[in-house]
Image: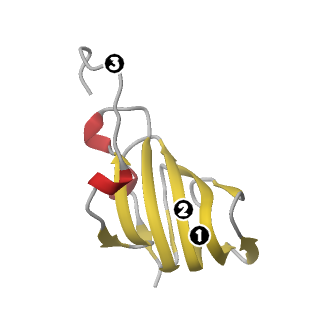
Amino acid sequence: MSVATRFLRRDVADVTPWAETCGQIRPLIEAADGAAGEVHHLEITDAKLHYHERTDEFYYILDGQGAMTLDDQTIELHPGVVVYVPRGVRHRAYGNLKVLVVCIPRGVLDDVHELE
């Protein structure tokens, strides 16, 4: 995002998904855009256990049912739930989920440390 570009608009339908640690990801706002953070649309069935050293994440559950393990606790996920995952917390989600993830600061895809 340059100084001349004052905003970004992306439609999830226009972004081709690809497989990564959490599932099928569609990066809507990514590091290359130069924004303060990133926004990703994820379809999660069985994410790998991982953590981030430099990135905090906010998961907003759009659709589906499932659960998330955060260190040694497990919580239920359903539409409307928001989960804050601070850097350093080992986490994984599973079920049948569509999730919007906000990552701060940008660069999360270079900050994934898989534990499985």
Quarter occupied by the N terminus: top left
* Relative to 71, 45 lies left or right: left
Q: Is residue 61 above or below residue 55?
A: below
Q: Nearer the viewer, residue 55 or 5?
A: 5
Residue at the (42%, 44%) spot, across then down:
38
**How far apart are labels 3 and 1 at the CA level?**
35 Å
Q: Which residue is mark 2?
A: 99
Callout 3 secondary element: loop
Q: Residues within 10 Å of mark 3 (few under 14, many from 20)?
A: few
Q: State which quadrant residue 77 falls in.
A: bottom right
Residue 58 horizontal side relative to residue 26, left or right: right
Which amino acid type is shown beneath numbered disc 1? Answer: Arg
Disc 2 marks a residue whose amino acid type is Val
Disc 1: which residue:
90
Q: Are circles 2 and 1 on residues that touch, CB within 8 Å?
A: no
Q: Residue 43: x, y in percent?
A: 46, 70
Q: Residue at x 25, y 62 (%)?
A: 16
Give the Cα separation between the discs numbered 2 and 1.
Answer: 18 Å
User: Is residue 85 rendered to the left or right of residue 35?
Assistant: right
Q: Quadrant of residue 61?
A: bottom right
Label 2 crowd (10 A; few <14 / some 14-19 / many >=20): many
Point out the tag, 2 or 1, that comes first from the N-terminus.
1
Which residue in the protein does label 3 denote?
A: 6
Seen as rendered, the residue at the extreme top is 4
Where is residue 64? Give x, y as percent. Answer: 62, 73
- Where does the image place residue 27, in percent across and percent down from the top left? 34, 53
Along the line of sight, which residue is nearer the eye, 25 or 15?
A: 15
Image point (56%, 72%), residue name: 97
Q: Residues within 10 Å of mark 1 (few under 14, many from 20)?
A: some
What element does badge 2 sit on? Answer: strand
